[in-house]
Image (cartoon, rainbow, N blue to C red):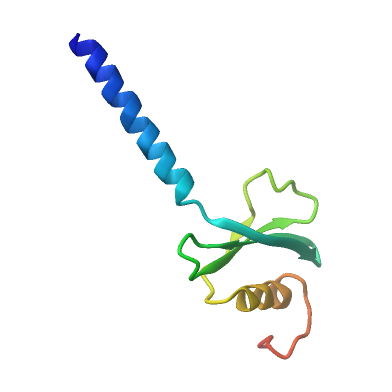
Amino acid sequence: MLFKKSILFLLTTATMLTTSTIAMADSLISNGGGGDYKYQLWRSTDNTQYYIKIWNRDSSTNSAPSYITHSFESSRDALDYFDCNYANKSLPSCQR
């Protein structure tokens, strides 16, 4: 009887942790590429921060990203960072 209660407790706890992890997942906003790289733009769960996962152009996005950037306050700032530092674009926002 104690064994059954222990198993039930463990299963319930695991389910709760999995559910909360899924509910707290960040959101994929967009993807694209430039230069020798491709990216996925992600938004944090609380919708206040953005970050980019970056892969070499020939890599699969199912593999671990080559780089993950720090947080940005806007999607525009994140995409400008990618364009300036990975896509080799010359934008007014690029600091050279």
* Residue 43 image position (x, y, % from top left): 56, 63
94 lies left or right of 47: right
* Residue 59 image position (x, y, % from top left): 75, 48
Query: Is 51 situated above or below 96?
Result: above
Residue at (66%, 44%) from the top-left corner?
63
Residue at (29%, 20%) from the top-left corner?
8
Task: Tally the numbered discs.
Answer: 0
- The image quarter containing residue 10 is top left
Q: Nearer the viewer, residue 27 or 50?
A: 27
Query: Is 6 situated above or below 33?
Result: above
Furthest-left residue in view?
2
Query: Is 89 situated above or below 38?
Result: below
Residue at (48%, 59%) from the top-left corner?
45
Furthest-bottom residue in view?
92
54 lies left or right of 68: right
Residue at (72%, 70%) from the top-left corner?
86
Furthest-top residue in view?
1
* Residue 11 image position (x, y, % from top left): 35, 25
For the C terminus, which image quadrant? bottom right
* Residue 5 image position (x, y, % from top left): 23, 17
- The image quarter containing residue 30 is bottom right
Q: Nearer the viewer, residue 89 or 72?
A: 72
- The image quarter containing residue 38 is bottom right
For the N terminus, which image quadrant? top left
